[in-house]
Amino acid sequence: MTEEIIIAGFGGQGVLSMGKILAYSGIMQNQEVSWMPSYGPEMRGGTANVTVVLSDERISSPIINSYDTAIILNQQSLDKFEATVKPGGLLIYDPNGITHYPSRKDINIYSIEASEEAGKLGLAKVFNMIVLGGFLKLKPLVKPEFIHKGLEKSLPARHHKLIPENEKAIDIGKTLIKAVHLV
Amino acid sequence: MKELKLMKGNEAVAEAAIRAGCDGYFGYPITPQSEIMEYLMYQDPQKTTGMVVLQAESEVAAINMVYGGASCGKKVMTSSSSPGISLKQEGISYIAGAELPCLIVNIVRGGPGLGTIQPSQSDYFQSTKGGGHGDYRLIVLAPSSVQEMADFAGLGFDLAFKYRNPVLILGDGVIGQMMEKVELDEFKPRWTEEEIRRNTPWSTMGKLNNRERNIITSLDLDSHKQEKHVAHLRDKYLEIEKNEVRYEEFQCEDAEYLIVAYGSSARISQKAVELARAKGIKVGLLRPITLFPFPKKPLLNYVGKIKGILTVEMSLGQMIEDVKLAVECKVKVEHFGRFGGIIPTPDEVVVALEKQIIGG
Amino acid sequence: MSDIVTKEQIRRPENLVYSKTKLLTDKALSYCPGCGHGTAHRILMEVIEELNAQEITIGIAPVGCSVLAYEFMNIDMQQAAHGRAPALATAVKRLMPEKIVFTYQGDGDLAAIGTAETIHACNRGENITIIFINNGIYGMTGGQMAPTTLPNMKASTCPYGRDVTTMGNPLRMTELVAQLPGVHFVTRQAVHTPSAVRKAKKALRKAFDLQKENKGLTFVEIVSNCNSGWKMTPVQSNKWMEENMFPFYPLGDIKVDGQLVK
Ligand SMILES: Cc1ncc(C[n+]2csc(CCOP(=O)(O)OP(=O)(O)O)c2C)c(N)n1
Ligand code: SF4
């Protein structure tokens, strides 16, 4: 099994840390992982993205141009990455701020109202975990116990008290994910 | 058991250096490698292993701090990215001339000039042909994974002390910024003064009564002596070429075509090999791990067995010259590259292979 | 209702109280919102405009957040390697003494990697103006310690605060160069309030006037904020600057007419 994922949105939306938690959980589950971010001043307030690969085998390229899954959190990223999803692949987006919706017919498209729900529940800090929950509902690549371990490993010890809140957000995300178009 | 961590390449080389018993790091911030010094400052190894970490006022100062530390037989290192490495060249030349061991990390970005902070491999010539003035070579290690960033810190120090020669780890923005799983070595204690005196009898740790004074210099005004010294350097480099060639082959057994690529380009090319094989193209990948010494013989062995070689580099084509020399121009060799901070995609590599080598 | 002014009325030329100097391009500034670089650019270009000197001014941009100054300043500009701006400026001025030449440099550029170039250009008394933006941090590269970082102040390469016993004390470059005979006018300013901006602009004007009189090197430090690097909001950062930076880097003239101010 190899899963190639792009996560993209604004800097500050927790794009990089979502990828990191996913990657760390993969390691805990004894998989090979790679995490390749966009970097540099272009990220100041601008867009941020990260490519995460989880695999049972040695990972060849950490840089890829087509993905099994795209997790999209703003319009710029949707415009940029919709075309890069492999035919039959998965696109998840948060409709908040989206004006031009995805239009491909050869991929599975889901939406998740994560930012709205996070706002309502006062969970803005773990918004990214809601999105991750939605993804894991559709593709349960890592088991919850390994997500727990991944959170433990990727959060500094002083933030470990926030792990339950993160896990709760993941569970909420699982209930929010909605199919928009299926092939 | 070895410790498993998810780390950036930049963090891995820093952590591995602490664990390898590094005595000192001297650097100056520059993207995309600032995490090396930031990580070291955060870990604060002075409190645990006693390793010194210092932010210098410039790359020129940093490399000269390395010169001073290395003269004392200490395991010292510096890191930078292309524009900063250019500034260090004078110091590197002195260090090579004085035959001092040290570790230098270059996380290459696109140039020339201030260029871009995005990944590139355009410092190949500078790294493998000397870089500064004079007849000298660095041992150049080209990691293609975060694990190798960690492994090459220890290996780099070992080779540096074995040959009394500076070792360069040549990475790029991809290798520095990406996170992967790493297995970290156990902590090796730093050498004690007694060990340093034993392991590096040439070092300037203070003249004891039982030996002559030691002098570290790269100067010899007597040309005959200087010629001898340079000949000695040549013999050392030949010895290194004999002993230290490292490379990796991927799907080469039945290959009709070969891709040669190092560092992150090798990762992209490995994926390209997978894609091409799925199309029925028999192609393999040879990845030089040491760029000096370059795997000349292994490449020459392919002459007569393959129909063509594509070199993939994030540059206008620099390593291709060594590949052509290695196969003595008996095989068609073509270059494919993106540059200026653009990373080629595996698909582009396959297209280049089809157009430039198979079709061409 | 006649006393309510409409948008159209406001926009009439006679109601215009301010317009952007033509010496700033229309390119949107790449600085973080709240950063002092933008204001410093503006008053610098206003002064060049007031001097009617667009055609004879050459600016040298550094490496730092203001590396792109040439995108915003509508004059001929050169972009130097990190720290080397005073060397470029020296040559430009020596080869074309009738021109106005300035460098615009951050603290890392001017007071770390470029210390030698700065001190020697000052010591030679080059007839140039050095504008020194001191924000106590390396903004461009993501908030590392600068030579001017305050004691105990946190930065990414001093995450536990600057420990002066191992990392050195903050360098008051401006006081240092003021000691050199070749330096004619030295002042320290800020641009975080309207009155500070007015003073800073006057200081810049004076520096360029003196350059035209061939008086020697003129040096204008502007203590500024780096809200991104300091990890504060712009408002917080200005307050922090007043409370922490100004006591260490007091504002005012340091050398006037070649004489140190007591
Ligand atoms: C030779 C060299 N070394 C390092 C760098 C990386 N670098 C770019 S800007 C900078 C520091 C900028 O700080 P400062 O001068 O204080 O300006 P600011 O960004 O805060 O305005 C550094 C170290 C470089 N470009 N060239
Ligand atoms: S990083 Fe700091 S100095 Fe640079 S533009 Fe932002 S606030 Fe200004």
Image: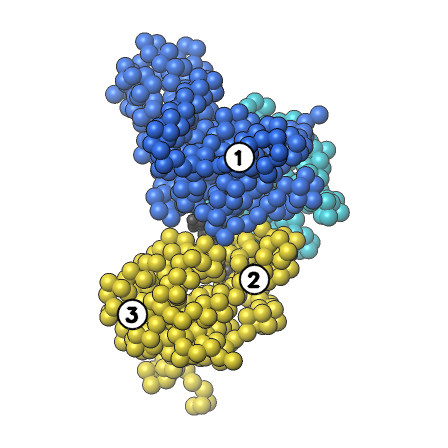
Direction bottom: furthest residue: C2
A115 is higher (above) or lower (below) than B219: below
Residue that mark 1 sits on: B214
Residue B272 located left or right of residue A4: left
Foreground pick, A133 / C157: C157
Mark 3 falls on what kind of element?
A: strand
* Front one among C177 and C230: C177
What's under tag 2, amino acid-wise?
Pro
> Callout 2 environment at 10 Å: few (<14), some (14 to 19), or many (20+)?
some
Task: Name the chain letter of the residue that bears numbered label 2.
Answer: C
Depth order, front residue of B274/C103: C103
Residue C101: x and y in percent read 31, 67
- Colouring method of the image: by chain
Q: Which chain is yellow?
A: C
Determine whether, in the image, residue B359 is placed left or right of residue C225: left
Residue B192: percent from left, percent from top: 66, 34
Q: Amino acid at mark 3?
A: Ile
Same chain assignment for discs 3 and 2: yes
Chain shaded cyan: A
Q: In 3D space, how far apart are the residues under numbered discs 1 and 2 (Cα atoms)?
A: 37 Å
Label annotation for residue C170: 2
Q: Position of residue C183 (x, y in %)?
A: 40, 71
CA distance separating discs 3 and 1: 54 Å
Asked where in the image residue A66 lies, by quadrant, the reply is: top left
What residue appears at the point 34 percent right and 18 percent down from the top-left corner? Answer: B326
**Residue that badge 3 annotates:** C100
